[in-house]
Image (tube, rainbow, N blue to C red):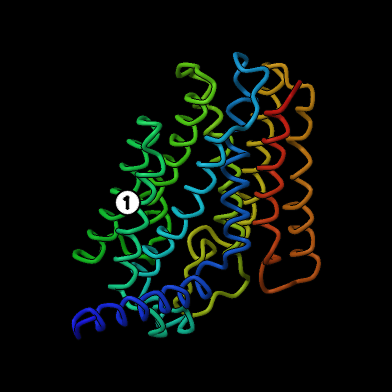
């Protein structure tokens, strides 16, 4: 091997090592992959649960591909988010890999390009899903490019940042719906719209609750600074209730005998809220929002398997 080849090999090995440090610090594999699998199987099950045309839905190889796709996709989105939030992390989370210098911006861009290519190849057998996925991956790059060039939107404007980021989440739900249609051989139905609304409302709880704090640090990004503590807490509890009510109505209409499963996950946010108020804890219980969404996804999956 010549000197140039040796340098390229060593450089590649060093980049892989930096990627590993990024994964360890920003994308813990076990909980991240678990969340991706629950999202893919749960939301696909949700589409079946509210679709009266699919009484015998079962997950298939396409669902497994969707789960792997989301696991990799969430890693790529984490990379873009860390690039966009670099200045903020240097101030408030200096131990994150990019802020600490354990990985470089260029490393994450290479990771994104390689991962996006792999995802498109993985989904080449479902052209509609692949097209939606390509749009979502491209949108993520566009958002970061605009932010890097224009510093817009400011990360401190949480509501605007959330609205700008929302299309990426919506496209991933549409990606799962395209996979659901491909697996069942069905055509699009208007039932998909309320189903997406159900999961978006459930996700609002995670977005709000994980940032609830009684006394924000200077410069900390929390919705408490926007809506106040009472407003943020109320919204974090109302959103999952509306989501559960919609699911009860739609799943029952579609013949879901176990539609009451929609109510079970509500125990987590309301228990967490009670603990937060009673204990005067400075922050919302850390694990509760993610556990609520995981349990909600599990309920969607069971409803989708209705006899």
Q: Residue furthest front?
A: 1
Vertical arrangement, residue 65 with respect to residue 141, above or below: above
- Position in image of residue 90 (x %, y %): 40, 82
Q: Residue at x 73, y 72 (%)?
A: 281
Q: Is 159 left, or right, of 25 in this rendering?
A: left
| Residue beneath the point at 56% across and 35% down | 61
Q: Secondary structure at mark 1?
A: helix
| Disc 1 crowd, CA 10 A, few/some/many (<14, 14-19, 20+) | few
Residue at numbered disc 1: 117
Q: Quadrant of the C terminus?
A: top right
User: Residue 103, image x and y in percent?
Assistant: 38, 79
The outermost residue toward the top is 53
Q: Is residue 90 left or right of residue 54?
A: left
Q: Is residue 33 left or right of residue 105?
A: right
**Closer-to-camera residue (124/237):** 124
Name the image quarter holding residue 264: top right
Name above or below for residue 272 compared with residue 242: below
Q: How many marks?
A: 1
Query: At x 57% / y 68%, what residue is drawn?
Result: 28
Q: Vertically, is 263 above or below 72? A: above
Coordinates of residue 212 in the picture (x, y in percent) = 60, 64
Relative image position of residue 147 (x, y in whole percent): 26, 62
Image quarter of the N terminus: bottom left
Quick check: 216 left or right of 293? Answer: left
In front of the other: 10 or 273: 10
- At x 33%, y 53%, the residue is 140
Q: Which image quadrant is residue 291 in? A: bottom right
Return the residue nearer the eye: 185 or 260: 185
């Amino acid at each position: 091997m010549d000197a140039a080849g040796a340098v390229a090999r060593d450089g590649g090995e060093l980049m892989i090592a930096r990627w590993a440090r990024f994964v360890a610090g920003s994308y813990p594999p076990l909980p991240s992959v678990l969340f991706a699998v629950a999202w893919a199987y749960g939301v696909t099950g949700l589409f079946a649960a509210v679709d009266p045309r699919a009484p015998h839905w079962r997950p298939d190889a396409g669902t497994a591909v969707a789960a792997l796709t989301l696991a990799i996709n969430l890693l790529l989105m984490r990379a873009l988010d860390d690039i966009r939030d670099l200045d903020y992390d240097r101030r408030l989370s200096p131990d994150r890999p990019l802020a600490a210098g354990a990985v470089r911006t260029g490393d994450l861009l290479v990771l994104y390009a390689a991962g996006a290519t792999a995802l498109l190849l993985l989904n080449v057998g479902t052209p509609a899903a692949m097209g939606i996925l390509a749009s979502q991956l491209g949108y993520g790059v566009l958002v970061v490019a605009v932010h890097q060039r224009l510093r817009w939107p400011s990360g401190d404007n949480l509501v605007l940042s959330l609205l700008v980021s929302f299309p990426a989440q919506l496209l991933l739900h549409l990606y799962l719906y395209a996979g659901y249609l491909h697996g069942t051989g069905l055509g699009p139905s208007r039932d998909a719209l309320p189903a997406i609304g159900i999961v978006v409302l459930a996700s609002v709880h995670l977005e709000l609750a994980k940032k609830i704090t009684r006394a924000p640090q200077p410069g900390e990004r929390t919705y408490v600074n926007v809506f106040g503590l009472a407003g943020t807490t109320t919204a974090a509890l109302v959103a999952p209730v509306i989501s559960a009510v919609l699911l009860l109505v739609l799943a029952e209409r579609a013949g879901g005998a176990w539609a009451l499963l929609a109510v079970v996950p509500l125990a987590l946010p309301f228990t967490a809220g009670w603990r937060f108020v009673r204990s005067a804890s400075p922050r919302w219980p850390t694990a509760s929002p993610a556990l609520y969404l995981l349990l909600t996804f599990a309920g969607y999956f069971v409803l989708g398997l209705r006899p």
